[in-house]
Image (cartoon, rainbow, N blue to C red):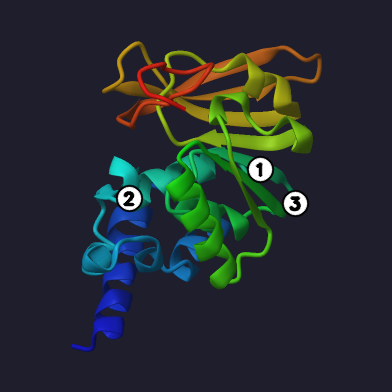
Amino acid sequence: MHAETDLEVRKERMLSEHLLARGIRDAAVLRAMREVPRESFLPPEMARLAYEDSPLPIDAGQTISQPYIVAYMIEALELSGKERVLEIGTGSGYAAAVLSRCAAEVYTVERIPLLADGARNRLQSLGYSNVKVLHADGTLGWREQAPYDAIVVTAGAPEVPAELLEQLGPGGRLVIPVGPSQHLQNLVRVRRLPRGDFRREHLCAVRFVPLIGEQGWDDGPY
């Protein structure tokens, strides 16, 4: 079977077996997961594994999340397509590309220069023109572009960074893995209520790389 055809078959299997069968229902998210070529966000030797439902290694010792968790977290943001979204933890840019098909504007922050530069170039070359990439401490968000309708964090934090809560607009949703361990977290959704207070709900248990920075874990140089 031709490599491109094989990838398309694997992608359709991912959609049916790993997304639809596990409860992903948001039409925009499913469409974005079908449209975005995950193989383009992986090292070439990993391309054949692009649509397996597992995290995969990328540069700088980081990982690209499994397709199901990407879809689950984006669905949890409850996007209508008109939002300004902040992503913390760009990685290779895959989730930002998916977000770009579900929201109006995507701002994404990556602390590792190699990943930030690579994602910026990759997203531009693939035509994701509504995504802006910043190299910075993601735990501090991107204040100049705030407020945001939705924020998603793709690394595990010891607690929800106060700076991100401040940058969430009224009615906004923040989805973030939180826990006292760097190896296991709970995925939570925080809503900013009209009066400015917050409501927090538990979604599921997850495992992410640690969120390193001023308002995250401090076991790595910025």
Q: Position of residue 43 (x, y in %)?
A: 30, 62
Q: Is residue 140 above or below residue 96?
A: above
Q: Alpha-carbon neighbours of circle 2 within 10 Å: few (<14), some, or many (≥20)?
A: some
Residue at 77% x, 34% y is: 144
Q: How far from the left and from the top, in percent, is residue 52?
A: 24, 58
Secondary structure at numbered mark 1: strand
Residue closest to the eye, 174 or 131: 131
Disc 3 vs disc 2: which is toward the camera? Answer: 2
Mark 1 → mark 3, Cα distance in angstroms: 9 Å
User: Mark 1 and mark 2: span between their CA atoms?
Assistant: 24 Å
Q: Nearer the viewer, residue 17 or 98?
A: 98
Residue 173 or residue 107, whichever sits in front: 107
Q: Nearer the viewer, mark 1 or mark 2?
A: 2
Describe the element under mark 2 as helix, strand or loop: helix
Tell me if 26 is positioned left or right of 131 in this view. Answer: left
Image mark count: 3
At 21% from the left and 67% from the top, the residue drawn is 45
Contact between marks 1 and 2 (CB within 8 A): the answer is no
Q: Earlier in the sequence, mark 3 or mark 2?
A: 2
Q: Residue at x 65, y 49 (%)?
A: 106
Would residue 62 be visible to someone looking at this image?
Answer: no
Instruction: Find residue 85 and name its label.
Output: 1
Q: Please indicate whether residue 164 sits to the left or right of residue 125 in the image.
A: right
| Residue most extreme to the right | 195
Residue 95 can be seen, yes or no? yes
Residue 53, given in percent of the width and then of the height, sits at: 26, 53
Q: Amino acid at mark 2?
A: Asp
According to the image, label 3 marks what residue? 82
User: Which amino acid lies under the numbered mark 3 shown in the image of this protein?
Assistant: Lys
The residue under label 2 is 59
